[in-house]
Image (tube, grey):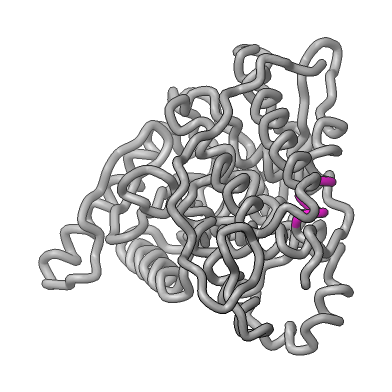
């Protein structure tokens, strides 16, 4: 029989695997944004590059809990322009005009694989496709931070924002590979597996944390902790643990140690750009800091309670996980786990988590999750 930690790792890992982007949809998204980049580069923007950033590049995508269930895929649209040759407003409009021309061309050619809609946002342009949408963020090179620094438009189109998605992805890869030696021992063929098809323990930890956060703040998007903040703190807190549940619990215990206070200003540095602060909004909106610590308290309590369920059976563990997370992915993972256990033993898992010869499937639990903790740490 599996240990409690192994059971929890398989149930949580199986659930976020359901929420991960499928290989087919991944390939579709890559094909679509590569075509967009090629078309724009050949129609008025020589040297233009489009590449992914954020969760799609990091391998930490989680399907949103909103009704449409569309995946958000963030892209950088890099134009080889000098900072002095354009304004933020001109840059955003130029990219928008070219994307609109691309959409018209796709329709004129009768192509059915094109975007169904082009939507202007405050900082980017959104191309909508079935099952996902591409958020295209206009940018130019940052000559003060070569080779991969970029300058982005801000929401008000006034100040240039510094970023380095490629450098950040490299940092996250290095943090993920703290467990690479263990992973390679377990899977001798890992080198033959495409990187985007393989998930390290850290990637799965981040997916679990983001999943819980999306659920807890589904009705309070303004105060929801940013994914980049959760990912960065998890990356610093991760110490190479192989077991998923152990890694998640340990990361949660250590995350707050990587939040600094610089002369009264809360600070979490972008590992790829020392001038970028991922908690800058905390200083302007203290309620966002309180929301983060409320979430951290909530998910930490969940993990501690799960760690104390030794001997209580898989059914009880399943119901406790489902109380704090979306029940459907958890149920799918539970059924998969029960099937694997049955295949190994010739039995099926009963409602109490015990194995027997004939048992009904799991009933659908009511979905509740605890509210935000009122405590906030300094």
- Does 13 sit above or below residue 189? above
* Residue 180, horizontal then vertical, whole percent: 83, 71
Q: Residue at x 58, y 75 (%)?
A: 348
Asked if residue 59 is positioned above or below residue 208 in the image, the reply reads below
Magenta-drawn stretch contains 300: no
Quadrant position of residue 7: bottom right
Q: In this rendering, is residue 281 above or below 235? A: above
| Magenta stretch: helix, strand or loop mostly | helix
Region of the chain picked out in magenta, as a range: 245-250
Q: Nearer the viewer, residue 36 or 192?
A: 192
**Quadrant in which the C terminus appears:** top right
Q: Residue at x 65, y 29 (%)?
A: 295
Q: Residue at x 70, y 24 (%)?
A: 293
Rendered location of residue 342, percent (x, y): 61, 79
Q: Evaluate whether residue 101 shows in this view.
A: yes
Please tell me which residue is depicted at 77% across the width and 83% down the height of the picture. Answer: 187
Q: Nearer the viewer, residue 172 or 181?
A: 181
- Give the residue furthest to the front: 357
Task: Please identify the quadrant where the N terminus is shown.
Answer: bottom right
Front residue of this view, candidates 74 and 5: 5
Q: Nearer the viewer, residue 134 or 5?
A: 5
Q: Is residue 338 left or right of residue 131?
A: right
Asked whether, in this view, residue 212 is left or right of residue 104, the answer is right
User: Does residue 234 appear left or right of residue 132 in this picture?
Assistant: right
- Image coordinates for residue 310, horizontal then vertical, percent: 80, 53
Tell me where residue 297 appears, x and y as whole percent: 72, 28
């Amino acid at each position: 029989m599996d240990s409690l930690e192994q059971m929890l790792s398989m149930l949580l890992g199986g659930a976020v695997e359901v929420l991960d982007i499928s290989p087919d949809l991944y390939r579709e998204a890559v094909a679509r944004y590569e075509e967009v980049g090629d078309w724009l580069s050949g129609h008025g923007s020589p040297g233009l590059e489009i590449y992914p950033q954020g969760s799609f590049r990091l391998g930490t995508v989680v399907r949103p809990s909103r009704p449409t269930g569309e995946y958000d895929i963030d892209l950088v649209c890099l134009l080889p322009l000098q900072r002095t040759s354009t304004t933020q407003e001109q840059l955003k409009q130029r990219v928008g005009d070219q994307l609109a021309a691309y959409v018209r061309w796709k329709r004129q050619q009768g192509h059915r694989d094109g975007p169904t809609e082009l939507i202007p946002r405050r900082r980017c342009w959104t191309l909508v496709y079935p099952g996902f949408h591409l958020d295209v963020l206009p940018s130019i090179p940052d000559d003060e931070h070569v080779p991969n620094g970029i300058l982005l438009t801000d929401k008000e189109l006034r100040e240039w924002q510094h970023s380095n998605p490629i450098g950040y992805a490299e940092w996250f890869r290095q943090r993920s590979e703290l467990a690479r030696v263990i992973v390679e021992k377990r899977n001798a063929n890992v080198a033959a597996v495409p990187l985007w098809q393989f998930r390290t323990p850290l990637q799965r930890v981040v997916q679990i944390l983001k999943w819980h956060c999306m659920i807890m703040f589904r009705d309070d998007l303004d105060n929801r902790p940013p994914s980049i903040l959760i990912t960065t703190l998890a990356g610093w807190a991760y110490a190479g643990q192989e077991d998923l549940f152990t890694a998640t619990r340990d990361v949660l215990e250590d995350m707050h140690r990587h939040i600094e206070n610089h002369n009264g200003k809360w600070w979490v540095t972008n590992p790829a750009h020392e001038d970028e602060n991922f908690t800058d909004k905390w200083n302007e909106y203290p309620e966002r800091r309180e929301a983060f610590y409320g979430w951290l308290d909530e998910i930490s309590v969940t993990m501690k309670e799960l760690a104390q369920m030794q001997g209580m059976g898989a059914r009880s563990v399943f119901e406790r996980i489902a109380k704090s997370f979306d029940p459907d992915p958890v149920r799918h993972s539970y059924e998969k786990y029960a099937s694997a256990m049955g295949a190994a033993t010739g039995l099926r898992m009963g409602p109490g988590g015990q194995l027997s010869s004939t048992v009904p499937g799991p009933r659908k639990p009511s979905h509740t999750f605890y509210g935000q903790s009122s405590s906030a740490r300094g």
